[in-house]
Image: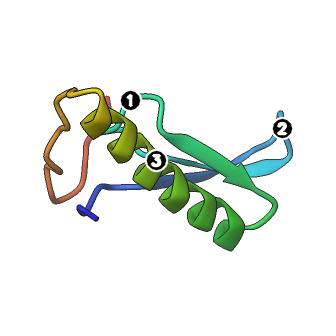
Amino acid sequence: MEHYEIILYWSEEDSVFVAEVPELPGCMAHGDSHEAALSNVKEAMVLWLEVANDRGLSVPAPKGGRLMYA
C-alpha cells in the first residue's frame, strides 16, 4: 500500500479517536483508542483503493512529506 498521511485526533463530539486520510477524499475511520482508529483506517484505505481501481477512477499519488493546512 502507498504511503499516505494519516491525521489522528480525538472527537469530543463523538467520544472516539478519528483517523483521516486527506489525500483520499472521504477516507476516514474511528475507534475507541489510537490503535483501533489506525487499524480501522488502514482497512478503509485498502477498500478505498480497491473500489477506485475497480471503477477505473484515478488514484492520487501520495504527496510525501507533511501536508499543510491553513
Image coords of residue 25 (percent x, y)? 38, 29
Which residue is identified by label 3?
A: 47
Q: Closer to the N terminus: mark 3 or mark 2?
A: 2
* Foreground label between 3 and 1: 3
Badge 2 amino acid:
Asp
Residues at badges 2 and 1 in contact (C-beta under 8 Å)? no
State the SS at label 1: loop
Name the residue located 20 percent from the left edge and 37 percent from the top edge: 59
Inter-mark Cα distance, 3 to 1: 13 Å
Q: Residues within 10 Å of mark 1 (few under 14, many from 20)?
A: few
Instruction: Compare residues 67 and 31 and report the one nearer the observer.
Output: 31
Residue named by callout 2: 14
The residue lying toward the viewer, choosing from 39 and 58, is: 58
Circle 2: element type: loop
Q: Quadrant of the C terminus?
A: top left
Disc 3 element: helix
Q: Residue at x 42, y 54 (%)?
A: 46
Residue at mark 1: 25
**On screen, 38 above or below 56?**
below
Occupied quadrant, residue 6: bottom left
Q: Nearer the viewer, mark 3 or mark 2?
A: 3
- Is 18 placed left or right of 45 in the picture? right
